[in-house]
Amino acid sequence: MKALSKNGKITIYQSVPDSFSSSIGEVLGGGKNMTEEELLAHGMYDCNYPDGYNSEIHNLSASPKFDSVNQVYNYTKTNKTWTETLAELKTRQINHLKSIANSKLKKTDWYIIRNAELGTEIPSDITSARADIKSTVDTKESEINALTKKSDVVIYDINIS
């Protein structure tokens, strides 16, 4: 990521643009082919996220600050706050987890219905896969309930493979 300051306005680029306007002139095409020294001469510096930044639990500063010693722009992070209680966040995550499990189980529900209505045997790979899903949900639900920090609940991986 790169940042360019012109007339006090910082513009952030995901990569070096082919054309841009800097305080020393216009670059019309070829910006992507410029050397690092040429980019620095135009005031195009690296722009970094802070170490450990996670958009789920951190807010970024509105704009990065220039570090003149290291010749780089750096965002700063602050911890997000949530209006929900820890218990409410846990409930939300567990409900989402169960929704994911329900979607996965739904794919094989017809085996269960067919067994209940007609007595048709359920293939062992299906009962095994369903048992794995339910076991994973039980484990993850216990892990979520054991968490003590809101941020840990928010970033907990509820995906079921």
Image (spheres, rainbow, N blue to C red):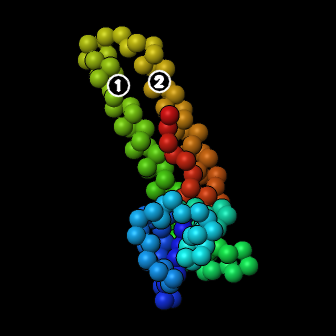
* Direction from residue 105 to residue 118 in the image, left or right: left
Question: To which residue does mark 1 refer?
Answer: 108
Percent coordinates x, y for residue 71 in the rendering: 67, 75
Is the residue 133 above or below the residue 77 in the image? above
Sequence-earlier tag: 2 or 1: 1
Q: Residue furthest right?
A: 69
Is the residue 71 above or below the residue 86 in the image? below
Question: To which residue does mark 2 refer?
Answer: 129
Residue at point 59% right, 63% down? Answer: 35
Is the residue 108 above or below the residue 46 in the image? above
Cα separation, mark 2 vs mark 1, equals 9 Å
The local crowd at label 1, few if under 14, some if 14 to 19, many if 20 or more residues have their Cα within 10 Å, is some
Compare residues 87 and 102 and report the one nearer the observer: 102
Hey, which quadrant is residue 20 in on the image? bottom left
* Direction from residue 37 to residue 94 in the image, left or right: left
Compare residues 48 and 35 and report the one nearer the observer: 35
| Residue 102 visible, this angle | yes
Three-letter amino acid code at disc 2? Ala
Residue at point 45% right, 26% down? Answer: 130
Q: Secondary structure at mark 2?
A: helix
Q: Secondary structure at mark 1?
A: loop
